[in-house]
Amino acid sequence: MKSFTLSPFRRMTTFIPSRNNDVEVFTLAEFKEKFDLVLKAHLDKKIASYISIIDNQISAEIVKHAASLVIVGGKRIRPYMTYLAYRTLGGTDIDCSFRIGVALELFHTFALIHDDIIDRGTTRHGIQTTHEFGKDKAGQCPTGDAHHVGESMAILAGDLLFSWSSEIVGQTESLEVKRIYNRMIDEVVAGQMLDVSLMLSRETTGETLDKKNELKTARYTFVNPLYIGEAMANKSIGNSFFEKFGLLLGLLFQIQDDLLDVVGRSDQTGKETFLDVASGQHTYLSQYVFLNGTANQKKILYEYFGKPVPPHAKEILMAMFRESGAVAYAENKVAEYATSAQMLLMDTTLVGVCKKRFSEVLEMLLKRKK
């Protein structure tokens, strides 16, 4: 793979798109088809290398299961954002864009594995979470704490994916890509820390929720991947388009996640519902009930907030979220962010296929079911 070089001081030329911009830019579906081949080949190579270090069946199975989460069900939004920004700004080394994209997907799965432990999730993308898979494997042994062993091995498998991600980024000569990547890690951890710390409180503020959603989702999923693509191309689109557009898409995306946790279908989302309630995580929906719900609606939410949600209670909670107006409020917020993103896209200097691809991403997000 070719490397790319960039000054650590972000000395970028301002990119002015041509009115005859006919550059080929893959759709997300086209990108995913080609990218997944590169991703799987890299994973196969790294797994083989890992197994050559220690020939232990359970260890190998845990790592393979963690790697399967990278392949199964991923939408590839983060690497596509990097690719789209890179191509929009005239980047031509597609292999290099794909390689950095692999690093982002490995980091994403590392974060999901640890997040599933925090949330006590049992399924992800329709298959067992890594710690649940590890628990089942450990349970086949006559001694030991299967739950603890399963979580411990999942943590280590996640760490391994993080190492593989960092290895790729470390191989680029671009100091700016490394800086953005490292900053992204700090922001994700800060957002997750804030999310977990809020489990200790029955109350929060809208400003705190916005900050949490910006750090753990918006900047991580959209803004920083776009900035990495910009850094690779060594050009700037100007007017902070990537920052503004990425934040709007990210906030929209997170509220959709909150909605799917309440009104989604597990056979479509590939994971359990009401995990946010069960883990006591504050969302726009829970915040709306705490601030605007009736005494009885608040009582229902308090009864299950931070506690296991039995199957019969899910219908009760879903009805409560709908009747309180929380679902409608969250849906209106999604529509509000989408309108702002559409207006921003209309006003940008982008033209042709690049502008079309950004518009398609927004349309895809508005139709997502998982």
Image (cartoon, rainbow, N blue to C red):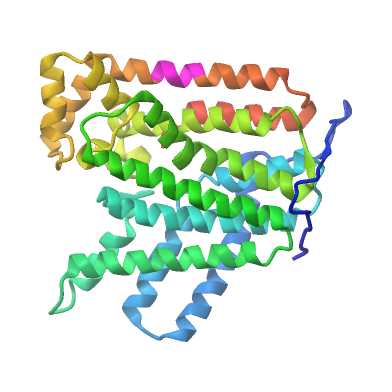
| 45 is higher (above) or lower (below) than 246 | below
Is residue 277 found left or right of 370 in the rendered image? left
Which residue is at the front of the view, 212 or 310?
A: 212
Residue, x 37% and y 21% (percent of image)? Answer: 330
x, y (%) of residue 119? Answer: 28, 48
Quadrant hosting residue 259: top left
Could one spot residue 275 in this view of the protein?
Answer: no
Total count of labels: 0
Which of the 4 quarters of the picture holds residue 271?
top left
Q: Per the image, is 119 magenta? A: no
Identify which residue is drawn at 29% across, 68% down.
152
x then y, percent, for residue 38: 63, 61
Prevalent SS, magenta region: helix
Q: Which residues are magenta?
A: 331-336
Check the image and report above or below for 314 versus 138: above
- The quadrant the N terminus occupies is bottom right
Residue 333 counted in the magenta span: yes
Q: Percent position (x, y) of residue 124?
A: 35, 50
Residue drawn at x 54%, y 39% is 219
Residue 59 in view in this figure: yes
- Towards the viewer: 136 or 286: 286
- Quarter of the image that includes the C terminus: top left
Q: Residue at x 34, y 54 (%)?
A: 127
Vertical placement of residue 343 versus 253, above or below: above
> Residue 62 falls in which quadrant of the image?
bottom left
Left or right: residue 269 compared with residue 222: left
Residue 327 pos. (x, y %) = 31, 20
